[in-house]
Amino acid sequence: MPLPHLPARLARVSSFLAMDVLSAAKAKERAGGDVVHMEVGQPSAPVPRRVREAARAALEAGQIGYTEALGLPSLRERIARHYRDAYGVDVAPERIVATTGSSAGFVLAFLALFEPGARVAITAPGYPAYRNIFAALDIEPVDIAVDAASGWVMTAEAVERAHREAPLAGVLVMSPANPSGTMMGRQALAQLAETCRRLGVWFISDEIYHGLTYDAPAETALAVHDDAVIVNSFSKYYCMTGWRIGWLVVPERLVRPIETLAQNLYISPPYLSQVAAEAAFDAVEELEEIKAGYAANRAFLLEEMTAIGLGEGPPVDGAFYIYRDVGRFTNDSLAFCRRMLEETGVAATPGLDFDPDRGARFVRFSFAGSMEDCRQTVARLRAWLR
C-alpha cells in the first residue's frame, strides 16, 4: 500500500543551519573532541538568581497548571511597566500577549496578520526562521538586501521599491539585528513606520535583543507607531533561552484573534516560566554584569578578527554576534564552517543561514560565551587561516 504524500510546503522549509552546526558540534564532543561553541545565540551565564528563586518558590507551592491563553495578568502588567520605565511609552496590559518564546509569537502574529500568498519584506541577511515560518504558512518572503551602503538596515526607500513591484502585506525588521548586530535609530524607525502607514501594510518589529546594546539604547517601534506589532523574548538579555517565554504587543483589535489562536495552538505559556519571567525584571544589576562580559568579548573580537585576516562586516551596535566576510578564504560558507569545526573545533554558523544569495562568503560568530571562548577561537583560527 503506497504511503500518503507529504505536503509540498515541507520541501520549502529549510533546516536551521545554526542548530545543525550545534548538533554536529555536540556529536564531536560526544566522540571526545574539543569544541569552542560560537554557533548559537545562547548566553553562557546562568539564569539570574531572582529568576531561580521565583521558580523554586512556585515549584514548592506545587500549583503549576494552565493560565489564561494571553498569560498571567501580573506578568502582562509587569511588561507594561517595563515599557514605561525603559522607553517612556504607555502600553495597556490588555495589549500584551505572553507567548511560548518569541518563536510562538511569530507564528501567532503571522497567522493573525497575513493570508496565504501575502508578501512580507525582510532583510537579507536576516534571521532564518522568518523565511522558514513563512514557507510553512505559504507566505512569500521579500528579501531587502542590506549592506554597508544602507547602513545594514532596511530603509523606507527600499520598502517603497519592493511595494511598487508587487504590493506588500507587511514589513518585518529586527533591531538590534541578527546576524549583523546593527541597530535602527529613532529617525530610521519613524521613516519606516510612516511608509508602512501610508502604504497600508503591517509593521512588525522584532526587539528580542533589546537590552543588549553597547553605545546607545535601542528604540522600540511603539515610540513611533502605536499600531506596530512587537515581538520580544526573555531568552537573550534575560538569559532564559530554555524557559521558552516571550511576549507580543499588538493593536487592540488583534488581541482577541490572537487569543483564539493561542488557545488552540498552545493553550497557554508555561506557568513556571511566566512566574520566573516576572522576576527577571528585578535582576537588572546581575544582567548588566553579564552584558559587561559581552562588551569585553565584542571589543576583543572586533580587533582580533581583523588582525587574523577576516574581512569587514557590519558594525556591532547590539546583540552578541559578529558577521564577517570570509570571501578571501571561500565562496562556500557551509563547507568552510564544516571544515573549520572538523579541523579546529571552532563551531560557527555559515552566512547561508541568513542570506541565501550573498551568505556564501560570510560567517557568523556568537560572543555570548566566555572571554576564554573568544581567545581560543582567535588562537585556533589564526593558526588555521595562515
Image (cartoon, helix red, strand yellow):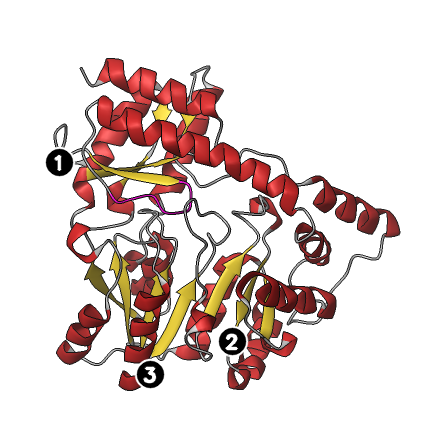
Q: Residue at x 39, y 20 (%)?
A: 375
Q: Can the viewer see residue 331?
A: yes
Distance from disc 2 to disc 3, alpha carbons, whole Å, reads: 15 Å
Classify 350 as above or below 113.
Answer: above
Classify 383 as above or below 359.
Answer: above
For label 3, count other residues whose C-alpha is less than 10 Å away and answer few (under 14), some (14-19) or many (20+): some
Distance from disc 1 to disc 3, alpha carbons, whole Å, reads: 40 Å
User: Mark 2 vs mark 3: which is more N-terminal?
Assistant: 3
Toward the viewer: 117 or 156? 156
Classify 8 as above or below 37.
Answer: below
Magenta residue span: 314-320
Evaluate if marks 1 and 2 touch, with contact meaning CB atoms under 8 Å apart. Answer: no
Where is residue 358? Give x, y as percent. Answer: 16, 47
User: Mark 1 vs mark 2: which is more N-terminal?
Assistant: 2
What residue sits right under mark 2 in the picture?
250
Q: Nearer the viewer, mark 1 or mark 3?
A: 3
What residue sits right under mark 1 in the picture?
331
Q: Nearer the viewer, mark 2 or mark 3?
A: 3
Which SS does the magenta portion mostly show? loop
Residue type at mark 1: give it: Asn
Where is residue 136? Give x, y as percent. Answer: 36, 64
Where is residue 157? Give x, y as percent. Answer: 18, 71
Give the numbered dot on residue 197: 3
Question: Residue extending furthest right?
Answer: 61
Q: The N terminus is located in which quarter?
A: bottom left
Q: Can the viewer see residue 6?
A: no
User: Mark 1 vs mark 3: which is more N-terminal?
Assistant: 3
Q: Residue at x 53, y 68 (%)?
A: 248
> Does dot 3 land on a helix, a strand or a loop?
helix
